[in-house]
C-alpha cells in the first residue's frame, strides 16, 4: 500500500498552470502531487559561440531549488559559490531532453533558456521539471511563430519524464519522497510523444537489479509518461 | 497620473498568503501588485559561533531572484559563482530589519533563517520582502511557542517597509517598476508597529533632494507602512 | 562628554593631503581624526559596455581596508576570494555619491575609477572616503582639462559625507569607533555643496528612532558636511 | 565494419597493470584500447561527518583528465577554478558503482578515495575508470586485511562497466572515440559479477531509441562486462 | 649613468618610519626611493593546526598592492577573486625570509602575521617588504617581551634584502622600475645580519647569465644589504 | 652515504620516453629515479592578447600533481577551486625556463602550452619537469618544421635543471624526497646547453648558507645539468 493510496503504476495528480508569471515567453507551474516547480522559457536572439554560423538554434536549461523547498533547509548555491554536482547533473539532463524534442535546425538564430526552480520538493523534481518545461517551451516557441519570427513551431512533439523504482521488491511509478528515500532502485525515464526513449537512467541505491526488473520498470514508466503527455496536451488546448 | 491609477500616497494591493509551502516553519507568498515573493522562515537549533554562550538567539536572511523574475533574464547567481552586491545589500537590510522587531534575548538557542525569493518582480522587492518576512517570522515563532520550545513569542511587533520616491517632482508611495526606473529619488523606509524607524535609505538616482522633500517622503512612507501593518495583522487572524 | 572632548555637533580634525602618491591622476590622503584613507582617482579612456555610444563618461569606485587597519586583524579579502557584503555596499555608495557630483554628459569618453583604501580605521571610513575621494576626483578632472582632453571640469561642486548617530540618547556628529560601536542609531549622510542630499542611510543598531530624532541628526549632519566642504575647498587652493 | 576491425559485440583489448605507482594502497593503469587511465585507491582512517557513529566505512571517487589527454587541449579544471558538470557526473557515477560492490558495514572506520585520472582518452573513459578502479580497490582492501586492520575483504565481487551504442542503426559494444562521437545513442552499463545491474544510463544523442534497441544494447553490454570481469580476475591472480 | 645618478652599487635612500599606524603590534612605513610599503606585524595567540603541540610559534606573511600603486591601474585582487601567482610567490618569499631570522622554538604559542601592502611602487617591492617587515617584526616581538609574554626576543638578527641585476651588460644594485623593466637579469638576495644567505633568486629575463656575472651580483647584493641593515638598526635606536 | 648509494654529485637515473601519449605534438614521460612526470607540448595557433601584432610566438606552462602521486593523498586542486601557491610558482618557473631556450621571434603566430603532470613524486619534480619539457617542446617544434609551418626550429638549445642542496653539512646533487625533506638548503638551477644560467633559486630551509657553499652547490648543479643534457640529446637521436 502506497502512502498516497495510489496503485503501483499510478502517477500522482499532475497539474500544469500556464502563464504562471508574466515576464517569460513561456511560464508554467507544474505540480506532481506536492512537488511544485516553476518552469520558464526565455528567448534570446543569438546562439552560443560553438554554434555560430551553423544555421541552428540552441536550447539550454538551468535548475535550482529554493533553500527551504525541502524538509530541512539546504544551503543556497549562490552562497556556496557554485552549483552542486546533483544540480549540474539535473540541468544537463533537462537540456538534453528538451533538445531531443525540437528540430534545432528550424529554430533559427535563437537560444531558449529554460529555468526550472523547485519551490516545493516531494520527490521526482527532475522528471516534473522536464514535463513542465516541455509546455513552457511549447508556449515560447508558439510565441515566436505568432510574432512571425519563426515560420513554424520546430517542436517535434511533447517530451515527458517519470521516475520508477523498486520499493520492498515491488516496482512502483512516480515515487514521492518517502518512497524514493527508501527505494532499492530508482530509474528516470524520458520519452517522446512517439514512444521513443531519450534518456534511461537507472541507479541501484541499495540492491542491484536484474534485467527483468529493469523491463518491468520501463513498461511502467512508458505508461506513466503517456498519462503525463495527455495532461500536457490538455493544458495547451486554451491559448 | 500613475500607471495603475493610484493616488500618489496609495500603496498597491498587498496580499499575504500564509502556509504557501509545506516544509518551512513559516511560509508566506507576499504580493505587492505584480511583485511576488516567497518568504520562508526556517528554525534551526544553535547559534552562530560569535553568539555562543551569550544567551541569545539569532535571525539572518538570504535574498534571491529567479532568473526570469524580471523583464529580461538575469544570470543565475549560483552560476555566476557569487551573490552580487545588490543581493548582499538587500539581504543584510532584511536581516537587520527583522532583528529590530524581535527580542533576541528571548529567542533561546535558535537561529531563524529567512529566505526571500522573488518569483516575479515589479519594483519594491526589498520592501515587500521585509513585509512578507515579518509574517513568516511570526508564524515560525508562534510554532516554537506552540511546541513548548519558547515560553512566549519574542516578537515586539510587526515590521514593515515601503518605498517612496520623487517622480517628475512629485513624491509618490510604493513605486512599481516603471515608476522606479524613472524616479529622481528612491527611498526605502522600514518601520516598527510602534511608529519607530529601523531603516531609512534615501538615494538620489538622478537629482539630489532637499530636506523638505525628504520629510514629505517620510510622512508618505509612514502612512503606507501603517496600511501594510494592518494587512499583516489581518493575515494572522486565522491560525 | 565625548572621548575626544568634542562638542556633540563637532567633527574631528579633517586633514586632506593632496598628491599623496605619484602615479594616480588624483591622489589624496584624508584623515578624519585617526581614520586615514588613501583615495586615488585613475583615468582610463573608454566606458563600460552598457554606456557605449551613449555619449557620457562613467565614475566607479572600489573600497578596501588593509588587514591591520583595525584593532584586531581582519582577513584579507583577496585571500578570502571575494569582497564581503559590507565592502560591496560601501563601494556602491561611494560611486553613487561621486556620480551625483559630476555631470557625466560632460565627461567625454572617460571612466574614472576611485580607489579608497583604509590604512587606519577609527570609525566613519565610508564618509571619510567620500569626502577625500571628492578632492581626488577634482584633481583628476582638472588634469583632464589642463591636458586639453576636456573643455571644462564637469564637476558640479563638492560632495562630502559625515556620520551622525544617537549615543545614550544624545545625537552626536562624526562618530569615532568607540562611539560608533555603542550607538543606538547610526546614520550616514551625503550632501552636495548646494545643500541637496544624495544619500541618507539611517540604521537602528539597537533602538529604533523617531522622526524627530531623525531630523535632529539630519541638521547635525548638514552642519558637519558644510565644515568638511570648507576644508575640501581650502585644500584645493594651491594647485 | 568498425575502425578497429572488431566485431560489433567485441570489446577492445583490456590491459590492467597493477602496482603502477608506488605510494597508493591500490594503483592500477587500465587500458581499453587507446584509453589509458591511472586508478589509485587511497585509504584514510575516519569517515565523513554524515557517517560518524554509524559503524560503516565509505568509498568516494574523483575523476580528472590531463589537459592533453584528448585530441585538442582542454583547459585544466584547477585553472578554471572548478570541476565541470561532466566531471562531477562521472565521479559520482564511479563512486556509486564502487560502493555497490562493497559491504560498507564491513569496511570499519575507513574511507577509501579512488582517483581516476585519464592520461590518454579514446572514448569510454568512465567505463574504463570503473573497471580499473574495481581492481585498485580490491588491492587496497586486501592490504587492509593483510595488515590486520580488517578481518576480511568486504568486497562482494567485481564491478565492471562498458559502453554500448547505436551507430548507423547498428548496436555496437565499447565505442572508441570516432564511433562515440558519431553514435545516435550512447549507453553506459555498470554490472556486478553476479549479473545484477548497478547503473544503466542511456542517452539519445541524436535519434531517440526504442525499447527493443535498448534490450539489444543491454544484452551486448552484459556480454562485454563478463569479458572485462574475466580480465579483472586474471589480473589479480598474482599478488 | 643611472636615472637617479646613483653609483652602480649604491642603494636608494632607505627610510624606515616606525609606529606608522596605531593598531598593529609592529607597524612600519618603509621607503626605498619612490617605493613605499606599509609593513605591519600582528600577533595572535595560537598556531596553525600543523604545528599544534610541537612547542613552537609561527610567522606568516601576506602581500598586496593598492590598485594604483603602479603607473597604470591594476585590478584589485579581491575583485578578481584570487591572489595572482606573483603575489603568492612574493608572500611565500617574505614569510620564509622572516622565519629564517627568528628562533621559532622560542616564539611560544604565538603566530605573527606580517602584512606588506605596497602603496607606491617603483621597483624592488619584495626586497623592500622584507627589509621593512624585519623591523615591524622586531617591534612586535619586543612588545611581547615588554608585556612579559616572552622571556626574550627570539629574533636572531635582522634580515634584509635587495635586488641586483644586469642592465646593458653592467651589474647594478637596487633597481628602480625603469631599470628593472629593461634589465637582462634580475636577482633578489635575502641575507641575515651574520652574512649568511637565506634566499638567492636569480632570473634571466632576457639574456642568460654566467657564473661570473652571478658572483659579481652577489657581492654587490651583500654590500647593499649591509647598508640596509645599518639603517634597520638605526631605526630601532629609539623605542 | 646517500639512501640510493649515489655519489654526492651523482644524479639519479634519468630516463626520457618520447611519444608517451598519442595526441600531443610533443609528449614525454620523464623519470628522475622514482619521480615520474608526463610532459606534453600542445601547439595552438594565435598568441595571447598582450602579444598581438608583435610578431612573436609564446610559450606557457601548467603544472599539476595527481592526488596520490605523493606518500599521503593531497587534495585535488580542481576540487579546492584553485591552484596553490606552490603550483603557481612552479609553473611560472617552467615557463620562464622554456622561453629562455627559444627564440620567440622565430616562433611565428603560435602558442605552445606545456603541461607537466606528476604521476609519481620522489623529490625534484620541478627540475625533472623542466628537463622533460625541453624534449617535449623540441618534438613539438620539430613537428612544426616538418609540417612546413616554421622554416626552422627556433630552439636555441636544450634547457635542463637539477636541484642541489646541503644535507648534514654536505652538498649533494639531485635530492630525492627523504634527502630533500631533511636538507638545510635547497637550490634549483636551470641552465642552457651553452652553460649560461636561466634561473638560480636557493632557499635556506633550515640553516642559512654562505657564499662559499653557494658556489659549491652551483658547480655541482652545472655538472649534473650537463649529464642531463647529454641524456636529452641521446633521447632525440631517433625521430
Image (cartoon, coloured by chain):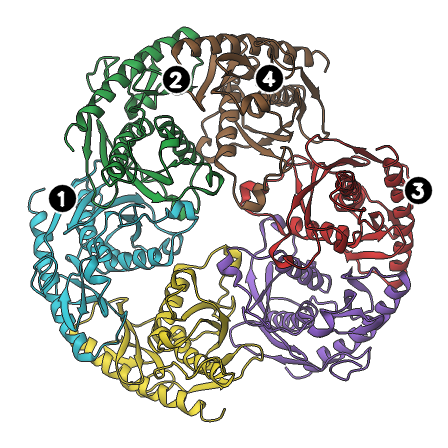
Chain colours: A red, B brown, C green, D purple, E cyan, F yellow
Dot 2 crowding, Cα within 10 Å, few <14, some 14–19, many 20+ = many
Q: Nearer the viewer, mark 1 or mark 4?
A: 1
Q: Which residue is mark 3?
A: A7
Q: Which of D180 and C66 lies nearest the eye of the viewer?
A: D180
Q: Nearer the viewer, mark 3 or mark 4?
A: 3
Can you say whether B81 is above or below B123 in the image?
A: below
Whether residue F75 appears in this view of the structure is yes
Which quarter of the image is occupied by the N terminus of chain E? Answer: bottom left
Instruction: Name the chain letter of the residue that bears numbered label 3.
Output: A
Taking the image as shown, residue D171 lies to the left or right of residue B129, namely right
| Residue F177 sits in quarter | bottom left
Q: Nearer the viewer, mark 1 or mark 3?
A: 1
Q: CA distance from mark 3 to mark 2?
A: 62 Å
* Same subunit: marks 3 and 4: no
SS at mark 3 in the image:
loop
Q: Which residue is mark 2?
A: C185
Q: CA distance from mark 2 to mark 4?
A: 30 Å
* Same subunit: marks 2 and 4: no
Q: Which of B186 and F222 lies nearest the eye of the viewer?
A: B186
SS at mark 4 in the image:
loop
- List x then y, in percent, for residue A208: 80, 60
Q: Nearer the viewer, mark 2 or mark 4?
A: 2
Q: Which residue is mark 4?
A: B151
Q: Which residue is mark 1?
A: E17
Dot 3 crowding, Cα within 10 Å, few <14, some 14–19, many 20+ = few
- List x then y, in percent, for residue A103: 78, 54
* Same subunit: marks 1 and 4: no
Q: Which of E160 and A14 lies nearest the eye of the viewer?
A: A14
Amino acid at each position: 500500500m502506497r502512502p498516497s493510496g495510489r496503485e503501483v503504476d499510478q502517477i500522482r495528480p499532475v497539474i500544469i498552470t500556464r502563464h504562471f508569471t508574466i515576464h517569460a515567453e513561456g511560464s508554467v507551474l507544474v505540480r506532481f502531487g506536492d512537488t511544485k516547480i516553476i518552469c520558464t522559457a526565455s528567448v534570446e536572439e543569438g546562439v552560443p559561440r560553438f554554434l555560430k554560423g551553423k544555421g541552428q538554434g540552441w536550447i539550454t536549461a538551468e535548475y535550482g531549488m529554493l533553500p527551504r523547498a525541502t524538509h530541512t533547509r539546504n544551503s543556497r548555491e549562490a552562497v556556496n559559490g557554485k552549483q552542486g554536482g546533483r544540480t549540474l547533473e539535473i540541468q544537463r539532463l533537462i537540456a538534453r531532453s528538451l533538445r531531443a524534442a525540437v528540430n534545432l535546425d528550424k529554430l533559427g538564430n535563437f537560444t531558449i533558456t529554460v529555468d526550472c526552480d523547485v519551490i516545493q520538493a516531494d520527490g521526482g523534481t527532475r522528471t516534473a521539471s522536464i514535463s513542465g518545461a516541455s509546455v513552457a517551451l511549447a508556449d515560447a516557441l508558439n510565441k515566436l511563430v505568432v510574432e512571425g519570427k519563426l515560420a513554424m513551431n520546430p517542436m517535434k512533439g511533447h517530451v515527458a519524464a517519470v521516475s520508477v523504482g523498486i520499493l520492498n521488491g515491488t516496482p512502483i511509478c512516480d515515487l514521492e519522497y518517502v518512497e524514493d528515500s527508501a527505494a532499492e532502485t530508482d530509474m528516470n525515464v524520458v520519452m517522446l510523444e512517439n514512444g521513443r526513449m531519450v534518456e534511461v537512467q537507472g541507479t541501484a541505491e541499495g540492491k542491484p537489479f536484474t534485467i527483468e526488473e529493469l523491463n518491468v520498470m520501463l513498461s511502467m514508466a512508458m505508461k506513466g509518461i503517456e498519462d503525463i503527455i495527455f495532461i500536457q496536451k490538455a493544458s495547451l488546448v486554451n491559448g
